[in-house]
Amino acid sequence: MTALQVLKSTFGYDSFQGRQSEIIDSIVNGSDTLVLMPTGGGKSLCYQIPCLLLDGVGIVVSPLIALMQDQVSTLKSLGVKAEYLNSSLDFDERNQILHRMQNDDIDLLYMAPEGLLRPGFFQSLQDVNVSLFAIDEAHCVSQWGHDFRPEYLRLAELINQFPQAKTIALTATADKKTRIEMIDKLQLNDPNIFISSFDRPNIEYRVESKGKGNQQLYSFIKNEHSEDTGIVYCLSRKKVEKTTAFLKSKGFNAYSYHAGLSHEERNENQEIFLSQDNIIMVATIAFGMGIDKPDVRFVAHLDLPSSLEAYYQETGRAGRDGLSSTAWMIYGLQDVVLRRRMIDSGEGASDYKKVSHQKLNDILGFCETTTCRRKIILKYFDEELSINCNNCDTCLSPVEQMDGTTFAQKLLSCIYRTEQNFGAAHIIDVLHGKMTEKVMRFNHDRLSTYGIGDDLDDYAWKSIIRQLVVHGHLRIHNEISSLVFTDSSKLILSGKLQFKIRKDLQEQKKPKVKKAKKAPSVDVFKNLSVGENQIFEEIKNWRTKTAKKLGVPAYRVLSNKSLSSLIDLKPQTSEELYEVHGIGAAKVKDFGEEILNFFESSN
């Protein structure tokens, strides 16, 4: 059987996407392979199909129990002999799976790196024909990355014991340095390297200055995604809990996920998120790696991510089905202060801190840019976009720039006269001429800069301070959070350096952003006739009931693309069902008769 035949008969797809076919050929022909492909690009098929074509068992290294359980459940529903070994199984279940594997009765075995490296398991592999090692989320090998897992560093030790097995490493995000590290640490032998475009054209990127965070989040969800599934990322557990409570008070189905919850509660909340519609998961970055839910319509960040890689990885969990989705973020000066403090107070070596500061500067540049945001993201991953994307806020509502030198001079003069010993809030109070206790205690009402900043409000001054810090014209003292001069501060103060700023000096309601044209096949259920709409609603209701009965997510029964394809093709026979996107032999067997019943009356 060929790869294309497996794709059609098992997974129900007519053709490969992008370079999937080349990647599969590389593996089957015996070459080590490195794959960089964006979330939703079809990475899983690149190793699942070779495992079905090659003799023996393919071992898939996956970092999260929930992810491997989800993928195995999906594969089993398609008739694939797939299993996982992890701590959720008891002794007898583990032995049964090992026995089946030794008898060549399993095509794919999913394992976490920790389990794979146990001495006892290594011994059990001695009599097994291992055809392939697939290392998913391979960027976890990088000590410079955002998801470092030390266990990944030891995987090469095990893989080298099976010279007959092929190796494929896959990730959705890695800069050039991380790619080199993956090849080195995993000891890939002259690998074929496949780098797909990192562009996710269906995702609209937006960044706003942080004001009243909860209210901003509420307005965003209420106005644009009130009935959608989404993820909200926060930096701390406490903020996760507060944000979850806030969203619940506004009537949303919101759940929490962070390391402080019990294992049982995390699993329960994740299962609700995966299996139900219109759920908002509020989480720290502990949630999300490899989450295979196609209909996440938005990812919101209430705090600044640590790097553009982390941001890309997290926002990539939206729109896996190719439909329009939003990556929305708010950030402010305090995010910059907190992130830099976290780096400087961390235990990493000086080189690591230097790289971390550079990564932080890269994402700050993304936040403050006045050009196309998608260009910034793609350039970070060594990919050029020749035209503006017209699907980010800076393209849809171009940002004005203005000469902010005079404002910066007022601010810097005030910082200088207060001897660089105070933070943003006090400096703004002095500029506004406020008679606070601190102003009176330090006699700052007698300064020449007292009251010279009444032409701007708090929001505007915070914006100017933030932009000065981001561009290196001010820094923040880590211990007392005071604003401190850099080498370029006096150049601005003396008029030798001009300072241009984003014109976001007034906190106001932004005009409704004009939506960009959606990617092809986005509006899958538009323009249905009355009869088609009735069939669609009937099948959708059947899908919901069937999923509930089977205890699986609705998309596992039929994806939205499969629904669209059904309405378009209106199959009348089992043979015609095979022409429907995402319907293969297993689904024809399990659901074919019930699905065809919906189209009997349409003739």
Image (tube, rainbow, N blue to C red):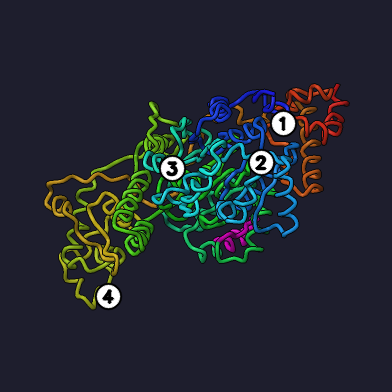
Q: Name which residue lies at 58% across and 56% down.
A: 118
The stretch drawn in magenta includes residue 494: no
- Mark 1 vs mark 2, foreground winner is 2
Question: Which quadrant: the N terminus?
Answer: top right
Judging depth in this view, the residue of 524 and 460 nearest the camera is 524
Judging depth in this view, the residue of 435 and 165 nearest the camera is 165
Q: Amino acid at mark 4?
A: Lys
- Asked if 339 appears above or below 68 in the picture, the reply is below
Q: Position of residue 305 (x, y in %)?
A: 43, 52
Q: Tag on residue 182?
A: 3
Q: Which residue carries the number 2 mark?
A: 108
Q: Which residue carries the number 1 mark?
A: 10
Query: Callout 2: helix, strand or loop?
Result: strand
Task: Point out the tag, 3 or 4, that comes first from the N-terminus.
Answer: 3
The stretch drawn in magenta includes residue 251: yes
Q: Amino acid at mark 3?
A: Met
Q: Which residues are magenta?
A: 243-258
Q: Name which residue lies at 59% across and 48% down.
A: 230
- Mark 2 vs mark 4, foreground winner is 2
